[in-house]
Image: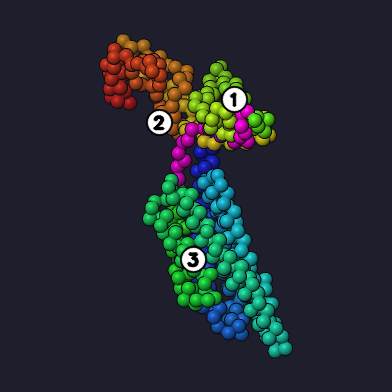
Amino acid sequence: MANHSTDRTTARLAGTALALASVLAIAGFTALGSVFAYPQILHEPTSDILALYRQHQTAVMGWFGVLIVSAALMAPAGVWVGRLAGGTLGRAIAGVGVAAAAVQVVGLQRWLTLVPGFSQDALDPGRRASAEQRFQLWHSVLGTGVGETAGYTFTALFTVLVVLALGRSLLPRWLAVAGLVAAGLIVTGVLVPLVRAASLSNFAGYLLWCVWLIAVAIVLFRFRPSAKPTSAVFASRPAHAGSRHEDGRSAIREAAHQILAVESLTDYPKGVTTTVGLISGGTAANVIPQHCRFEIDLRVVTAADGEDYAARILGLKARDPDVRVTIQGGMNRPPYERSEATGALFEHARREAAGFGVDLEEVRRTGGGSDGNFTAALGVPTLDGLGIDGDGAHTLHEYGLISSIAPRMRLMRRLLETL
């Protein structure tokens, strides 16, 4: 059962990491382009590169440090976006994000750890040739090989995976397309050793990518988790129900045990109810069922009970070690808790109803939910259940009393006039 406040926090953390990575990258590349002519300087003779590095060493090292932080932020960003996406795709985003961060940090750190020594050794005529050779070697290995070729590949792959994960649910179409275009341009960087013109398309790709990161960050900051039914999904080992019965592990049997565990959490005195209302599973009558799924309805009176019972459901463990259980989804709204201000509002409504002969009664709980749950959770005095009288909600015998329509309309009018 997903915690929706946690999802929103995760989205904001991911957005912060992506936006900060973009801003730092823009700042770093802009500053290095100004003080070090980077990356064009890399096409100059090694002696010129090291000489310019020595001339502005403090600034160059500082701004490469900024780029390292920018690159490192891809790791937590990938983890947080992966958590939002969930499933196999989410794990792939996290893994690729960490990999993209790692290879770029490894590639960039040479400017802080190795190049200072090379630049100083190059001042000694007897060690100059060796220093320049070592610079070229580590530039090829850590720069071109790890930081650039691997970095371009993982960055582009990360971008594509994020688009696949968020494209349908969060990202507008234009932003998804922009991400894919940026990824395509970035990956052309692997061709730079063969096609020098590819550096231009790679540069354009990174410019677009930085803007794309900020746009995605804005989307994540505006993210509002949608409610999904709380469900338990079971996966086991199928087998023929006759000839190989002993080889099978029944997902439905495991689900039956878990249904009893879920529904045993019901506590009427506390106003807590748990219900398994939908279930599906199996593939054929003569096959030990590999899959089963059921949906859980959890209703509570207080937020504290909501957290408590959600944790209990999240803690469900399979009895059979050969069956995998996954709990997903979450409560779609906070509980409607009665406050003193809401109590005062109800007393006002009751006095107004009594004025035209209606005895308005307060119900401790109904187990229902509405937008009133959200306003009450914000501390706004809220009355709910002001509709007409009836019974059998959501059943085939549900009905409403026509005789209650006029009194309810009159009450609503009086509330609008007096509040």
Front disc: 2 or 1: 1
The part of the chain drawn in magenta is 222-242
Q: Residue furthest front?
A: 243
- Scheme of image coloration: rainbow
Magenta stretch, main secondary structure class = loop
Q: At 55% from the left edge and 27% from the top edge, which residue is drawn?
A: 285
Residue shown at the point (43%, 16%) measured from the top left: 362
Q: Is residue 227 visible?
A: yes
Residue matched to label 3: 186
Q: Is residue 270 magenta?
A: no
Q: Where residue 133 appears, x then y in whole percent?
A: 67, 82
Contact (CB < 8 A) between labels 3 and 2? no
- Residue hosting label 2: 371
The residue type indicated by label 2 comes to Asp
Give the left or right position of residue 339, taking residue 108 as reference: left
Task: Please state the horizontal and vertical placement of residue 33, each as a whole percent of the image.
Answer: 50, 74
Residue that label 1 marks: 256
Residue positioned most to the right: 126
Q: Are marks 1 and 3 in contact (CB under 8 Å)?
A: no
Quarter of the image with the N terminus in it = top right
**Cα distance between the residues tagged 3 and 2:** 46 Å
* Label 3 crowd (10 A; few <14 / some 14-19 / many >=20): many
Q: Quadrant of the C terminus?
A: top left
Horizontal relation, residue 251 to residue 347: left or right: right
**Tag 3: amino acid:** Ile
* C-alpha span from label 2 to label 1: 34 Å
Mark 3 or mark 1, which is nearer the start of the sequence? 3
